[in-house]
Amino acid sequence: MQIHNPATHCGANARSIAAPHDILCVVPNESTEMTDFFRNVHCIMGLPIDAMSMDEAVRRLQHARISRQKCFFSTPNLNFVMASQKQAAFRESVCMSQLSLADGMPLVWVARLLGIPIPERVSGSDLFDRLRQQTESLWRVFFFGGPKGVGQTACLAIGDKPVGVLPTGYIYPGFVHTDEMCRDELLQCINQSESDMVVVALGAAKGQDWICRNHHRIDAPVIGHLGAVINFVAGHVKRAPLWMQRSGLEWVWRAKEETALVRRYLSDGLSFLRLLATRVLPLAWHQRLHRPTQEALRHASLDCVRQGSLHLIALHGAWNLGNLRAVREAFTRVAQGDGNVVLNMAAVASIDSAFVGLLLLLEQALASQQRGLSLRATPRSVRRTLRLSSVAHLVLE
């Protein structure tokens, strides 16, 4: 294990500390941040994705840095989607994040097919490059993970020029269990660096798990798993030409540069084709057949009452991105309360990706407080929308 936390820069003067092995991670029982139900979030293949451009994403992270408000951001790509189909904990880690950006072009293509307003691909690598290029502020960045020696190389590659990004340190935890990477002295090392952002590179599943366990204990306001960034910055892996990135062919280049990825790409690609045929295309057709009427949208309403320990929300009419304000307000109120939440869907005519995205956020907000969400009397057409959106787990009837 390598741990380096320089006072002002990385390199020969970086200090090293010992790494005892008798302290285990403490997982917080509940989130201290309130869920933002006014995000422009949509469900794409079972994951919440923010409809946000690169410029908007940069401004969102800048706001978190300046205000010191926590922003755990995820960058779902096709591998994230496939992993979330098999592992509920992985899906929950994305739902837990305060910002979820469409890193993979397949997500953008699916969004366009389904009429979801995702403006562009916002990859983690491009986002980090934008932070390096901007000059109005200086981001203090700590690297956690990556192959042995790459964190140090990345720090040296950035250098200590006061433009864009300043490296504050790195930790190479080695190939150990997540518990071993949650020890107090590792987190203290990160906190002592007084960083603005922690870039995690541990592999998607382990990286998301580590962030979910520890982001409440880390002082840096911004944290995200950017697995490839550390390799790109260090120069160990060369990025694809811009035309390949924009055309969705970056995976071909990555497979050439990192042959270990070939098997994963083949597996994810085949799984994506099955998902496309069995859910995405049927969902597009289902939406076309069940377009809401203007009357159903205009007269959409809800009633929210307290019944014992339960919050009961009865929804009526059709719900889509344009008329969700009442839903956002109701979800905000019940998330701040106590007790389980029940949604009566009997009078719901139709829902869209924005409504389903809010359901995912509400489910995770309640779960973080050991509370539950259930949908009752869900009409067949709405159940089909949920199933084809890869969130059938929300309907337990």
Image (cartoon, grey):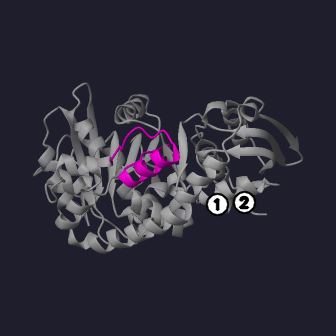
Query: Which part of the image, by quadrant, shows the N terminus?
Result: bottom left
Question: Mark 1 or mark 2, which is nearer to you?
Answer: 1
Q: Is residue 244 magenta?
A: no
What is the x, y in percent for residue 36? 58, 37
Identify the residue position indicated by label 2 in the image.
395
Q: Earlier in the sequence, mark 1 or mark 2?
A: 1
What is the x, y in percent for residue 342? 79, 50
Q: Is residue 109 magenta?
A: yes
Vertical comparison of 13 with 322: above or below: below
Residue range (magenta): 97-123
Task: Give neighbour class at mark 1: few <14, some 14-19, many 20+ (Cα, 10 Å).
Answer: some
Q: Residue at x 27, y 43 (%)?
A: 126
What is the x, y in percent for residue 174? 29, 69
Residue contact between numbered discs 1 and 2, judged by CB atoms under 8 Å: yes
- Give the Cα distance between marks 1 and 2: 9 Å
Q: Is residue 371 visible?
A: no
Identify the residue position indicated by label 1 in the image.
387
